[in-house]
Image (tube, rainbow, N blue to C red):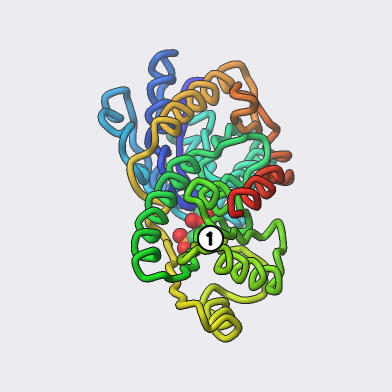
Amino acid sequence: IKKVGVLTSGGDSPGMNAAIRSVVRTCAFHNIECIGIYRGYQGMIEGDFKEMGPRSVNNIVNKGGTILKSARSVEFRTPEGRKKAHENLVKAGVDALVVIGGDGSFTGGLIFNSEYDFPVMGIPGTIDNDIYGTTHTLGYDTALNTVVDCIDKIRDTASSHNRLFFVEVMGRDAGHIALNAGIGAGAEEILIPEEDLGLDRLLDSLQKSKASGKSSSIVVIAEGDKIGKNVFELKDYVEANLPEYDVRVSVLGHMQRGGSPSCFDRVLASRLGVKAVESLIEGKSNYMVGLREDKVSLTPLEQAIKGKSEIDRELLRVSDIMST
Ligand code: F6P
């Protein structure tokens, strides 16, 4: 290959910039040209490209967001959109693609490859950690630290007022953020889509918690939880059934996607970028680079999209024991 195109697509996540930097510098290291594609697949369709060299990625290893911007392109879902994108890549001399994003972005890459036989390599970038084939996606570790920091602060006020807080965290359909940040922040209960705790058990647990002498409580709820009530309805429900509780809700929202990446995410991004480019050089395509047992490894993109990233069920038990 002679020229790699790199793009970020879907929801941004801390560590994407570090991954762009790694891709650009690995290309330079191997004397391959590199262009940045702005706004994900939308920029591919519009030919929004910029030549990138090692100095164009100075001082971004520590920056949240993505200097290439991100988008969820509707047009790329059409054959016409992909045709335009392909023409632009050919015109610019790009002959391989590194896609940094989540499963939607990988699906786009896979379809593009099947239509144009264009080499594609994926780097998992999402705070949700919901991709099969890697124990960590880029941004997940940073998001966990952000959430724990927020809950620590909420705990201060919860305990001062003897209140119960429901804290809603992101994660789309997955409970990784809720489960791990919940344990890290010492939550009394954690509600995740993978495990239906049930309303009765929640009430029971809150009652026991009060009886055991706890004056304040934190319940972390994943946005994709399936308990059947949204976080505000849950507040009303608990207040109606347990009037002894003074309940507040905090929805953390998009602050979870921002901020300077943790050291873990920066190192991961650097490792994955190197592997992505070097795998393309070796002639590989249609893989996602990820981390398994702390080794950088390749998973076929199709598996990464279709497979399910399971939660660690032992953590549920740990959480139960910790809330004793
Ligand atoms: O996939 C990352 C994520 O932040 C999810 O956790 C969340 O459900 C979604 O994106 C929010 O998307 P948007 O930024 O489009 O509102």
x, y percent for residue 98: 52, 33
Q: Is residue 165 left or right of residue 295?
A: left
Quarter where residue 96 is shown: top right
x, y percent for residue 58: 26, 28
**Mark 1 CB lies closer than 8 A to ligand 1:** no
Establish if 171 lies above or below 278: below
Q: In this view, does 258 lie to the left or right of 280?
A: left
Residue at (67%, 49%) from the top-left corner? Answer: 316
Establish if 124 lies above or below 277: below
Quadrant into which the C terminus falls: bottom right
Which residue is at the front of the view, 80 or 18? Answer: 18
x, y percent for residue 151: 42, 56
Q: For the residue carrying disc 1, how many other residues have a C-alpha within 10 Å: few (<14), some (14-19), or many (20+)? A: many
Q: Farthest residue toward the top?
A: 30
Can residue 279 be seen from the camera position used here? yes
Number of marks = 1
Q: Which amino acid does label 1 sit on?
A: Val
Residue at (37%, 56%) from the top-left corner? Answer: 255
x, y percent for residue 26: 43, 19
Residue at (54%, 39%) from the top-left corner? Answer: 137
Q: Identify the element where label 1 is drawn.
A: strand
Which residue is at the front of the view, 313 or 48? Answer: 313
Can residue 74 be seen from the camera position used here? no
Which residue is at the front of the view, 310 or 205? Answer: 205
Establish if 235 lies above or below 66: below
Residue at (54%, 42%) from the top-left corner? Answer: 86
Please give the residue where the numbered disc 1 appears in the rendered image.
220
